Image: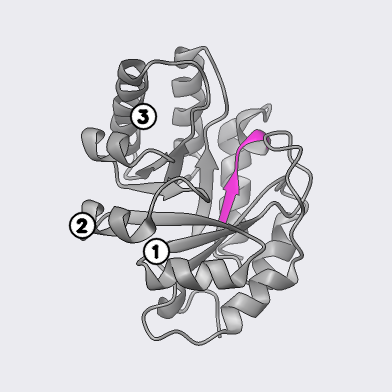
Amino acid sequence: MNPSDASYGAVLRGLYAITPQLDDETLLLALTGKLLNGGVRMLQYRDKSGRTPRQREALAARLLDCCREHGARLIINDDLALALATGADGVHLGVGDGDLAVARRALGEGKLLGATCHADPARARRAAEAGADYVAFGAFFPSPTKPEAELAPLEVLSSFRAGGFDRAAPAICAIGGITLENAPELLRAGASLLAVSSDLFLAARPEARAAAYQSLFNP
């Protein structure tokens, strides 16, 4: 089956940028704008800093405005209440960060739900049954964002992709230590979304870096 097949989330295909921990919000917004100019069409606001809930909501609102200007989607990491409060395009829930079925009902139609599945196809299937639009496997390579993460085998992508589903299958997202050099093997294994943070936000030319990633999806 081709990874662009509609049953594998053809709409959810491409580069998925994840915000790093930056205290300088002006810099974060500037870098985000460059990445969106380069072709990013999904952005995840991930914030493990000491910002207050009010500060997080204000920053999320600014990121959402930036995404709207570029026709992109904003996903909130691990915070369903923040996603609902800001009118973001969806939420991504890690293991233990909330009930997926409850989140699906709260989001309603037209909003995206993502789920962390590490290297566990069974968890991914349960997430799909709960209404997840995409499932995230990884980390596949050592990552400065989560250096302690256990690495997942590439085979988990192809094995999950080959499974049959009673409903539309979720898109498959790869995450963890992704670079331009190792991204192609993830796509060949079955990923339709590449979630990248450091290799984008730390790039010397973020816009060009994002464009180079996007070109991998349109050879």
Q: Nearer the viewer, residue 92 or 178?
A: 92
196 in the magenta segment:
yes
- Can you see residue 179? yes
- Can you see residue 41? no
Horizontal side of residue 23 vs 138, given as left or right: left
For numbered disc 3, what is the local secondary structure? Answer: helix
Q: Earlier in the sequence, mark 2 or mark 1?
A: 2
Q: Which mark is residue 63?
A: 3
Location of residue 127 by image quarter: bottom left
User: What secondary structure characterizes most of the magenta part?
Assistant: strand
User: Residue at coordinates 23% horizontally, 58% vertically from top-left?
Assistant: 105
**For the residue marked with disc 1, what is the amino acid?**
Asp
Location of residue 216 by image quarter: bottom right
Would you name the residue on which mark 2 appears?
108
Would you name the residue on which mark 1 appears?
133
For numbered disc 1, what is the local secondary structure? Answer: loop
**For the residue marked with disc 3, what is the amino acid?**
Leu
What's the colour scheme?
Answer: one colour
Q: Position of residue 137 (x, y in %)?
A: 62, 59
For numbered disc 2, what is the local secondary structure? Answer: loop
Marks 2 & 1, CB-CB < 8 Å contact: no
Marks 3 & 1, CB-CB < 8 Å contact: no
As displayed, is residue 87 above or below residue 47?
Answer: below
From mark 2 to mark 1, how far is it between C-alphas?
12 Å
Magenta span? 194-198
